Amino acid sequence: MIQGNSVRYAWAQEEDANPIERLPLRRPAPPPKPAPGQTADLLRLRLGEELDYARRLIEVTGDTLSSDPIAVSRHLVALQSLDIVGQMLTHIATIIRSNDPTAAVRPSGWAT
């Protein structure tokens, strides 16, 4: 009979004799492909995604608070401020992701 460490030693030798390549269970997400007009800089794309996520969180918070008529009557200005902050985050994310930030800031009616 084989006991104790001798079994572990025997199994270790068998595993080394027939190595099996084990693939990871999860694959890393591929880097996002930039949309037309967006930068190829992965850091700037990720920062834009984070700003979009923050905007969505603020939007959900505002929607939740807006469903309460008492909260709306007491805090209307603060709820409007949440909406304005969400719009600002959207504009900042667009500028960060743009391959030409100056053009993204400039209003469409301005001359170059």
Image (cartoon, rainbow, N blue to C red):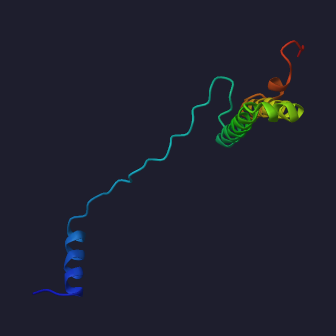
The answer to whether 95 appears left or right of 4 in the picture is right
Give above or below for 24 relative to 42: below
Which quarter of the rendered picture does the N terminus lie within? bottom left
- Residue 81, position as x, y percentages in the image: 86, 33
Q: Quadrant of residue 83?
A: top right
Q: Quadrant of residue 14?
A: bottom left
Q: Residue at 62% across / 26% down in the picture?
A: 35
Asked whether 51 or 76 is in front, the reply is 76
Tally of numbered tags: 0
Asked whether 101 or 76 is in front, the reply is 76
Name, please, the residue furthest toward the left: 1
- Residue 60, position as x, y percentages in the image: 69, 35
Name, please, the residue furthest toward the front: 70
- Residue 31, position as x, y percentages in the image: 55, 39
Give above or below for 52 relative to 108: below
Q: Residue at 88% across / 16% down in the picture?
A: 112
- Residue 92, position as x, y percentages in the image: 79, 33
Q: Quadrant of residue 98?
A: top right
Q: Residue at 70% across / 39% down in the picture?
A: 57
The answer to whether 46 appears left or right of 89 in the picture is left
Asked whether 73 or 62 is in front, the reply is 73
Give above or below for 78 relative to 104: below
